[in-house]
Each structure stands twice: as structure tokens, then as C-alpha cells.
Image: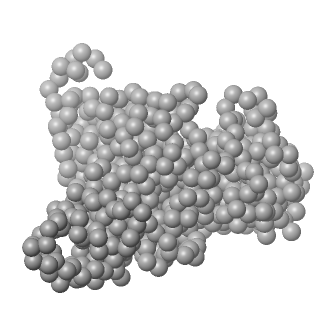
């Protein structure tokens, strides 16, 4: 920024339709202003003009159009005042309109994780007692009340918040009280018999979505679930971009930590409302997430995760008090963040291993959590290996020309044969394409030969056989620019065609090469082949929605019969629920950490060979029976 701009008077920036405004230094971008107001504008690249997603409509003010905006935005968008908020510097007062709002799909959330039966054995216990306080009997109440509890070696510790509840109205001769303990700690005293109301919250802090589950601890069943979008995404869709933000900006770590807690607070309140359970009956919390989410949750410096050798500051189980961190749960609630395995394989994967039973099973299993980072686990209870590969945000629709997340308006399924048809989430006109739709489209185009095994979109004149006319007319070549039109302009919500471009195919190849390559590398290390696999598990929200036959066709997962492929939903969240409801599963989580063998991929030439090979597509559809 020039000295003149630095010395210029502050400017007022207003965002419609909410009418929120603030005063900023001259030269502030619209994206930065929106962040300060907690207005969520998608910026997958962290505001570096790479993802081209952070669109707003500028009504007044702002600098001249930049070259990148002229290159990417359509003529219709430019006429309508659409700009990239990260490129709009406000040197005078400005007004802008938010043009998109992201909403977490509840239909998608309900598929997060399969309910797994578990014997309720929480470390939360409720004891009904009747006080007998003889007049003049010596001894403080804080000693007499624990004496009413079942005998325990070493006795019980008494929390100071518990002492504050010992009012004369509550504690008197003949009072029927419910005493609440967590392990050996006396945490709450409640009037009457409240034993039927004992709940916990399990939270999976994903890099894109934060999912939560309200669990009845007395029965071990999930009462309800909810999700919120992880607002850290405004600082980058991928983890490394967020880590870079924390390393670059003095307040970066504090900001992302605060965003995480805000999201979690919104989530727990929503769970309470949906489940019709007051928050003061929530006594336990478990949390999972990747190592970066762990560090940001606890406001730990993230530099060690962003620089070689990429080690976490801490990876063991962490017990904490939610209320002390600013989480709006009662003082009696106790929290645990499950242990991690390495700097890239976190508590979320420990949760996945818990939920899938991989560490206890005899069937050779490859489990893959498909997301911005792709984690793979291979083995049986005798031995299992795990690794992580940076797949990038292509599966979430970022860095794809018409890409978007799997929300209303996204194409999530494509069928290519004599015709090309697309299914749109919500049944509305299409606005873009999400990861599962992109995989379907590429798989179908591979079958027709429109895309060759190297990923190149072919000139129809070079193809050996004729193409269906309905597909042929959708292929466009303009020099090295090549694209396939999925939906025509007159059938979309914005009046632009939705396409799969050559660049989109390359992005998909990079993402699937990382996932497929890591699985192949683990198989090489363990000395097994695809035909030895007895089960392939697809975890995560994306893994639940992608069609197994399309995933096999593009080589995302090994060529195994479809009957061996199983989608398990949000297994990380399911694992967090198991650890919440059962002390045995909490112990298993720590055993998994000790048993897992982490395989580092970075810097190994033999992995790079596998990765490069995995970027290509299978030349022929593998047998699926």
C-alpha cells in the first residue's frame, strides 16, 4: 500500500442486506472488512485470488477492476457489479452486497456416522442420597456429603464449583439429593432425583464442518445431531493456508481459536434446543479433530505443524474444563480431546479406527477418510499402518471452475451414457458442481474415451469410435483450452454453463493421486495387493456420498468388488460418541495411539513414484463383481 493510502482518512464500509458497517483504514479489502464483522464470505485460498470464490456485488467505492477479475468473471457478472472481495481495496467509503450464504445441509448431517450399539458405561455417575444431619454433629458438609456416596478407594475429590452449590435451602436434614461424579471427582449436587437426565456432547471439529452429537449417557444412544460450518474457512480451505495465516498475522492464532469456540458454542446450543435438554444436564464432552484443529482449539502455536518435520506440540489425550475455555457448558462438565497419532494423523482418525473396529478386526481393511487432507489406515488388529496426504480442496469443490460444496444447487451426481444427466441437490436449477458430481462426470467420460488415462480431454476426431450425439456436442476445444459442458446456460441458476474443464480434471488428478497413492504406498509397505483387501471403508461426509463404482473407475480407491466397499459416514464423530458413552472405548482410543504405526510420506522418493503413477486414470473399467 502506498504512503498516500496509508495516510488517507479511514473509510466506512457497509455490507447489505444486513446493513452492517465498520470504519477501517483506507485500503482495507472487502474480504478483510467482512471478516472483522464476522460475515462469512467463502475464501478457499485465504484471500490470495486463487480460488476466485469470494464474490460480492460492489455498489459503491473500491479500486478499479484487476486483471484477475477481468480474466475470471463473466461479462454478465462484471455488468452486475460482481467483484472478488479479496481484490477490492477501499480507498473511499464503500457499499457491497453479499451474494451467497452457505448453509450446512441437515440432510447431509443425518448421514454423518452410523449409529453403533454400545453398552453405556460412561465415567459420569449419578447417585441419589438422603442427607441425615444430626444436630450438633461435628464435621463439615463437604466431608459428610461424599460419605453418602458408594465407597471408593482413595475417596472422592470435591470441585470448588460443587461447594458453591451447598446452599442452606438445598442441603438440609432429610433432603433428597442427586450427587454427580465424573470418575473420582464430585462435580454437582442437584435437588431431588435427576438420575434420568445425564447427557454428554461429542464434537468432531472438521476443517470444513463441525459436527456435534447429544448423547444420553444412561442409555448410550444419540438423542440428536447438528452441524455448523467451520468459520475458519474464511482464512483458507486447506489446513496449511490457515497455519500460514497464524504464522503471518500476529493475531492469527487468537482469531482462529476464537472462531472455533464460537462455532462450538453455536453447536452445543443447537444440540440443546434440538434435543430439548437443558445445558445444565450435560456433564461430559469429547472432542476429535486433526492436529491443526486440536492446536487451534487449545490456542497452541501451530508453527511446528507448518514446518518440517511437522510434529505436534502435544498428541496425548487432553482433559479440560469446557467452561474454563469459554465453552458455554456447565461448570460441572468435563471434557476430553482424544489422542492423536502424529502431526498429520489426529484424534479424528483415532475416532475413525474406533468406530470401524479396524484395530480389533481380523479382516484386512483399508480405511480412507477423504477430505482436504486424506488419511489412510491399512491393516488388522495384528498390525496397522496409517498416513496422511494433502489432497487439496478439489473434493470440496474449491479450485474447480464451477466447483462448490455439497449444498443446495450443487450437482452431486452425473450419469454419462447416450445422454448426459445431472442431479442437483434440492431439486433447483444448478449453480455448480461438488466433488461427488465431478468424480461421476470424469468416470463417465473415461468410459466413453472422452478423457484418456493421462487425463487429457480428447479431440472427438481422435477417438476410435463414434460418440453419442448428445455427448459429442458438449465437447469444446479452443486451442489448449478444453471443456465438457454438463449443463447448458439456459438450465442453470446464474445463466452460465456448468462445465468440467481440462484444468478441473488436472485438479482432480492431483487430489485423487494423493489419496490413491497413499493407499498404494501402505499396501506396498505391508506387502499386500488390492486383491488381498477384504474391506475398503470410505469415511467422512464425502466418502458417504461418492458412488463406489465412480471412485473405483477413476482409481481413487483400489479395484475391488463393490460388495467390499462400505461408506461409514462421519466415523470420526461416531468414535467420539463411543468414547463419550463408554470408558472401555476411551481406553481403546489410547491403545490405538500406542499401536498405530505412522508412515511419513513427505520426502520419500519411492512415494513420489507411487503418487505420480496414481495420478493417471485406469485405462479400462475394472471388474466390479
Task: Please determine whether, in this image, residue 153 is positioned above or below residue 62.
Answer: below
Of the 4 image quadrants, the one containing the N terminus is top left
Q: Is residue 622 left or right of residue 128?
A: right
Q: Nearer the viewer, residue 270 or 324?
A: 324
The answer to which of 156 and 236 lies nearer the viewer is: 156
Q: Position of residue 75 (x, y in %)?
A: 45, 44
Residue 378 relative to residue 372: left or right: right
Tally of numbered discs:
0
Residue 147 can be seen in this image: yes
10 lies left or right of 153: left
> Which residue does the image show at 75% across and 51% down from the upper left?
383
Work out whether residue 265 can be spotted: no
**As drawn, which residue projects farthest toward the right?**
464
User: Residue 460, image x and y in percent?
Assistant: 80, 49
Image coloring type: one colour
Query: Residue 134 placed where, x, y %?
Result: 14, 78
Q: Quadrant of residue 354?
A: bottom right
User: Where in the figure is residue 261, as x and y percent of width and height?
Assistant: 33, 51
Quarter of the image that includes the C terminus: bottom right
Q: Nearer the viewer, residue 199 or 536?
A: 199
Identify the residue at image location x=14%, y=26%. 9
Q: As displayed, is residue 60 above or below residue 245?
A: below
Residue lying at 75% horizontally and 38% vertically, measured from the top left: 611
Amino acid at each position: 500500500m502506498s504512503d498516500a493510502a496509508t495516510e488517507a482518512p479511514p473509510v466506512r464500509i457497509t455490507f447489505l442486506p444486513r446493513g452492517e458497517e465498520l470504519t477501517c483504514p483506507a485500503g482495507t479489502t472487502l474480504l478483510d472488512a467482512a471478516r472483522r464483522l464476522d460475515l462469512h464470505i467463502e475464501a478457499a485460498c485465504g484471500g490470495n485470488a486463487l480460488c476466485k470464490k469470494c464474490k460480492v456485488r460492489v455498489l459503491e467505492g473500491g479500486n478499479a477492476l484487476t486483471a484477475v477479475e477481468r480474466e475470471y468473471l463473466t461479462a454478465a457478472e462484471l455488468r452486475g457489479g460482481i467483484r472478488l472481495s479479496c481484490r477490492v481495496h477501499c480507498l473511499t467509503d464503500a457499499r457491497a452486497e453479499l451474494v451467497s450464504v452457505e448453509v450446512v445441509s441437515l440432510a447431509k448431517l443425518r448421514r454423518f456416522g452410523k449409529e453403533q450399539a454400545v453398552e453405556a458405561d460412561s465415567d459420569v455417575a449419578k447417585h441419589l442420597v438422603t442427607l441425615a444431619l444430626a444436630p450438633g454433629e461435628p464435621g463439615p458438609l463437604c466431608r459428610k456429603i461424599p460419605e453418602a456416596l458408594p465407597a471408593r478407594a482413595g475417596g472422592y475429590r470435591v470441585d470448588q464449583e460443587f461447594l458453591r452449590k451447598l446452599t442452606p435451602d438445598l442441603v438440609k436434614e432429610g433432603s433428597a439429593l442427586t450427587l454427580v461424579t465424573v470418575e473420582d471427582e464430585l462435580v454437582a449436587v442437584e435437588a431431588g432425583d435427576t438420575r434420568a437426565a445425564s447427557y454428554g456432547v461429542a464434537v468432531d471439529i472438521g476443517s470444513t464442518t463441525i459436527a456435534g452429537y447429544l448423547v444420553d449417557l444412561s442409555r448410550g444412544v444419540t438423542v440428536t445431531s447438528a452441524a455448523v460450518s467451520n468459520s475458519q474457512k474464511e482464512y483458507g480451505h486447506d489446513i496449511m493456508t490457515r497455519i500460514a495465516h497464524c504464522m503471518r498475522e500476529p493475531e492469527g492464532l487468537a482469531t482462529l481459536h476464537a472462531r472455533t469456540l464460537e462455532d462450538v458454542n453455536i453447536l452445543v446450543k443447537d444440540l440443546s434446543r434440538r434435543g430439548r435438554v437443558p445445558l445444565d444436564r450435560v456433564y461430559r464432552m469429547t472432542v476429535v479433530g486433526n492436529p491443526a484443529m486440536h492446536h487451534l482449539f487449545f490456542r497452541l502455536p501451530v508453527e511446528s505443524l507448518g514446518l518440517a518435520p511437522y510434529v505436534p506440540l502435544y498428541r496425548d489425550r487432553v482433559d479440560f474444563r469446557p467452561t474454563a475455555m469459554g465453552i458455554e457448558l456447565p461448570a460441572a462438565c468435563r471434557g476430553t480431546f482424544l489422542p492423536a497419532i502424529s502431526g498429520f494423523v489426529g484424534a479424528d482418525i483415532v475416532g475413525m479406527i474406533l468406530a470401524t473396529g479396524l484395530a480389533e478386526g481380523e479382516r484386512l481393511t483399508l480405511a480412507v477418510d477423504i477430505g482436504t487432507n486424506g488419511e489412510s489406515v491399512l491393516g488388522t488388529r495384528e498390525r496397522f499402518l496409517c498416513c496422511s496426504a494433502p489432497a487439496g480442496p478439489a473434493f470440496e469443490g474449491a479450485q474447480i471452475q464451477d466447483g462448490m460444496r455439497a449444498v443446495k444447487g450443487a450437482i452431486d451426481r452425473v450419469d454419462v451414457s447416450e445422454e448426459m444427466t445431472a442431479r442437483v441437490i434440492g431439486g433447483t436449477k444448478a449453480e455448480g458442481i461438488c466433488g461427488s458430481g465431478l468424480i461421476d462426470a470424469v468416470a463417465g467420460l473415461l468410459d466413453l474415451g472422452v478423457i484418456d488415462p493421462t487425463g487429457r480431454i480428447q479431440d472427438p476426431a481422435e477417438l476410435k469410435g463414434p460418440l453419442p450425439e448428445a455427448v459429442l456436442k458438449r465437447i469444446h476445444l479452443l486451442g489448449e483450452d478444453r471443456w465438457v459442458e454438463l449443463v447448458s446456460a439456459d438450465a442453470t441458476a446464474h445463466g452460465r454453463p456448468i462445465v468440467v474443464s481440462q484444468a478441473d480434471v488436472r485438479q482432480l488428478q492431483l487430489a485423487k493421486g494423493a489419496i490413491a497413492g497413499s493407499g498404494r504406498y501402505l499396501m506396498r509397505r505391508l506387502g499386500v495387493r488390492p486383491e488381498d483387501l477384504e474391506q475398503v471403508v470410505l469415511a467422512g461426509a464425502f466418502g458417504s456420498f461418492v458412488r463406489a463404482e465412480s471412485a473405483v473407475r477413476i482409481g481413487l480407491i483400489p479395484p475391488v468388488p463393490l460388495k467390499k466397499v462400505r461408506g461409514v459416514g462421519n466415523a470420526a464423530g461416531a468414535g467420539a460418541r463411543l468414547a463419550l458413552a463408554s470408558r472401555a472405548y476411551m481406553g481403546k482410543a489410547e491403545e490405538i495411539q500406542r499401536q498405530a504405526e505412522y508412515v511419513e510420506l513427505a520426502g520419500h522418493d519411492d512415494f513420489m513414484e507411487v503418487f505420480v503413477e496414481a495420478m493417471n486414470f485406469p485405462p479400462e473399467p475394472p471388474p466390479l463383481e
